[in-house]
Image: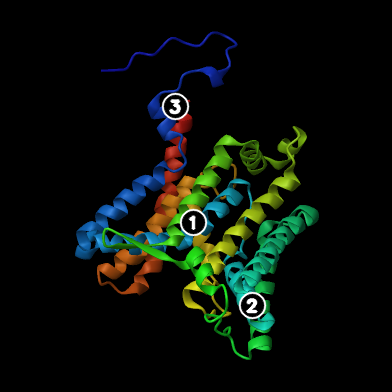
């Protein structure tokens, strides 16, 4: 039985004031495809891995997802704004190295090193944004250069100061225990251990979602990602917006870096290489377009959750972990195709 069309809008009526059906609103959500994919992954590993559904597995999956999700949220906002950051992975390691080496060499309270690391990490983010907006070069080139420089600095400074490729232990220094509580603690609920990174992840996703949907800055992000020149023509501060987005990525890198440091006490200078692609993959699986102007922070969280389920689901299924990258690539392709189909359906119903 065919549906009956509702009354047509009066001529000249503002289409933003028209009532939208729940189905149309659902199809218009960027994260719809990733939610469907997450459900499929959950069902799949629930069938093939007996231990996947155990309560203790939930904390492990959420922890794996949170370590990616903390970075995926600001990376998603950056992609919605039409840009990339290939230095995000090594910037996490840089943040941890700065905190550790400054605290150890200056024999200060580790909180001094933590705040110095925050300032330096934000400076790297500002550098990326400044170079992008001043040189007009693609963000791929700018951040690839930063990636290479940070990779060299991480290794070079660590060997110069510590004599090895890893930092010295700061576990016995003043302030270490309180910093570990903030960045690397865990608590037990119903026999399940949850890491504090899950809380950081939830807070960052909530803030990113609020920025996108409830603030003027969120409108600017969508505008510069859709068409920067047109946005500039109507008064959007394009330069300020893009620098702000890179600062957001840098702040998340600082949080992740401190978690890395205070979880293990010692940091290897070569860590982080390649993680930037995982952050981008999580955002794309979550519905962000490579071309910018479309996506959501919630979608990035779903993408990170898919990553967590897959990485741990393969272990619980007792498969060879070498298959993980294959599944990650397959999910990227399938999620992109599904997101494109959902978007076309949403446009067709307008």
Specify which label sits upstream in the sequence, 3 or 2. Answer: 2
**Numbered disc 2: secondary structure:** helix
Residue 96 on image: x %, y %? 59, 72
Q: Is residue 292 above or below residue 168?
A: above
**Numbered disc 1: secondary structure:** helix
Find the distance from the CA under tag 2 to the CA under tag 1: 24 Å
Q: Is residue 171 above or below residue 283?
A: below
Find the distance from the CA under tag 3 to the CA under tag 2: 58 Å
Query: Can residue 282 be seen in the rendering of this structure?
Result: no
Find the distance from the CA under tag 1 to the CA under tag 3: 37 Å
Please state if 294 lies on the left or on the right of 333 as rendered.
right
Q: Is residue 160 above or below residue 253?
A: below
Q: Residues within 10 Å of mark 3 (few under 14, many from 20)?
A: few
Residue furthest bottom as drawn: 163
Please state if 2 lies on the left or on the right of 259 as rendered.
left
> Quadrant location of residue 25?
top left
Picture residue at 54% right of the left edge, 79% below the top: 267
| Nearer to me, 294 or 344 | 294
Which residue in the protein does label 1 denote? 200
Q: Quarter holding the N terminus?
A: top left
Residue 82 on image: x %, y %? 63, 48
**Numbered disc 3: secondary structure:** loop
Picture residue at 34% right of the left edge, 60% below the top: 309
Residue furthest front as drawn: 174
Which residue in the protein does label 2 denote? 103
Which residue in the protein does label 3 denote? 349
Query: Can residue 111 be seen in the rendering of this structure?
Result: yes
Q: Residues within 10 Å of mark 2 (few under 14, many from 20)?
A: many
């Amino acid at each position: 039985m065919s549906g009956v069309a509702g009354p047509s809008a009066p001529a000249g009526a503002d289409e933003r004031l028209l009532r939208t059906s729940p189905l149309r609103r659902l199809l218009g959500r960027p994260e719809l495809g990733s939610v469907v994919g997450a459900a499929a992954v959950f069902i799949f590993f629930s069938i093939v891995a007996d231990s996947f559904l155990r309560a203790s597995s939930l904390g492990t999956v959420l922890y794996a997802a949170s370590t990616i999700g903390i970075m995926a949220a600001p990376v998603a906002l950056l992609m919605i704004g039409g840009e990339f950051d290939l230095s995000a992975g090594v910037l996490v390691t840089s943040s941890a190295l700065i905190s550790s080496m400054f605290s150890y060499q200056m024999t200060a309270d580790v909180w001094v090193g933590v705040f110095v690391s925050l300032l330096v990490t934000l400076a790297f983010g500002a550098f990326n944004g400044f170079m992008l907006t001043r040189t007009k070069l693609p963000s791929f080139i700018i951040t690839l250069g930063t990636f290479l420089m940070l990779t060299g600095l991480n290794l070079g400074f660590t060997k110069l100061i510590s004599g090895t490729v890893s930092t010295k232990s700061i576990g016995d220094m003043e302030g270490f225990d309180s910093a570990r509580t903030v960045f690397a603690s865990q608590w037990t609920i119903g026999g399940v251990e949850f890491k504090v990174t899950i809380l950081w992840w939830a807070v960052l996703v909530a803030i990113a979602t609020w920025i996108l949907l409830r603030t003027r800055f969120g409108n600017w992000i969508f505008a510069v990602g859709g068409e920067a020149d047109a946005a500039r023509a109507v008064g959007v501060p394009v330069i300020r917006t893009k620098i702000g987005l890179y600062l957001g990525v840098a702040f998340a890198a600082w949080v992740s870096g401190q978690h890395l440091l205070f979880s293990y006490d010692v940091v290897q200078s070569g860590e982080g290489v390649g993680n930037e692609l995982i952050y981008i993959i999580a955002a794309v699986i979550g519905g962000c377009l490579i071309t910018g102007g479309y996506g959501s922070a919630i979608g990035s969280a779903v993408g990170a959750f898919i990553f967590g389920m897959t990485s741990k689901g393969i272990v619980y299924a007792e498969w060879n972990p070498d298959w993980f990258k294959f599944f990650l690539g397959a999910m990227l392709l399938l999620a992109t195709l599904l997101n494109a189909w959902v978007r076309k359906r949403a446009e067709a119903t307008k």
